[in-house]
Amino acid sequence: MGLSHAQDTAIPDIGTDVLSGIARELECGRPAAPNAILGCEILAQFSAAGSPDSGVLKTSSFTGGRRWIGVTVISDKSRLPRESFQSRSPFQVLVVLGARYSGNFHKKMYFENGYGYSYIWPHNARQVAMIDSAAAALLQGQLDQDNVVIPFARQLDLRIESTRPSTGKSLMIGGPHLFLRQSGGDLYMIELGSSEERAKYYLSRIRLDALIR
């Protein structure tokens, strides 16, 4: 029922061993593929980033909340990566991050304070082109309002989950597998997952000026 950092038990922050493992997975010493290069950049930026500004969440002070779109690199070396369409790992998708906050007791009873997120990945070659175009604009500091991905992202259903502190710099969204940090006007997320009993990593960068709602 809303944020209660003082009462929550801190979750262990992502360890340097995990960050090093992601770097090895992406071959960050000598990344070759463009997606690997971007993933290594996000990893380095996440590692240097600090704790998120609580004001980012609190400015989302209405029921509908605020929403941003960003770029995600997924490393998934399983046989059939779920979010890939005829592409080798690592591959690029989009991420939608939403935030909602209310100081009203009655609203907090019915509407969770916190963040929600969802990835957008392609199911055909046309969608690959749309996602790549939107991502290219975001990486250039622009928001392609003419891309049909944007209205889709505005309407995407997000499950808002409460936040919890970690033992380090990260803010946790929901459970113990998603780590959020901030550097200036950029948010960075790392999510740890699994696919076919293999480790799977989501590395995201979201510009706070890439506001879509």
Image (cartoon, helix red, strand yellow):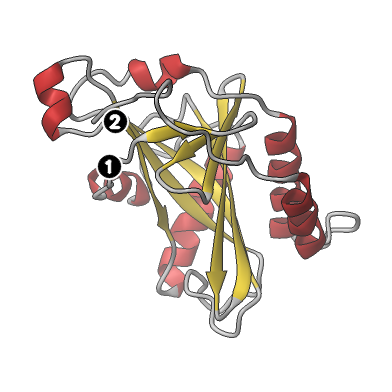
Are circles 2 and 1 on residues that touch, CB within 8 Å?
yes
Q: Residue, x 54% and y 76% (percent of image)?
A: 81
Q: Where residue 112 sits: x, y (%)?
A: 23, 34
Q: Write down the quadrant of residue 105 in the picture.
A: top left
Task: Identify residue for label 1.
Answer: 154
Q: Residue, x 57% and y 28% (percent of image)?
A: 186
Give the SS element for disc 2: loop
Q: Is residue 58 above or below residue 120?
A: above
**Hey, which residue is sitting farthest right in the picture?**
29
C-alpha separation, residue under disc 2 versus residue under disc 1:
7 Å
What amino acid type should be assigned to the residue bearing mark 2?
A: Arg
Residue 124 is left or right of residue 153, and the answer is right
What amino acid type should be assigned to the residue bearing mark 1?
A: Arg
**Hey, which residue is sitting farthest left in the picture?**
106
Q: Where residue 139 sits: x, y (%)?
A: 60, 40
Task: Identify residue for label 2.
Answer: 213
Residue 24 is left or right of residue 78, and the answer is right
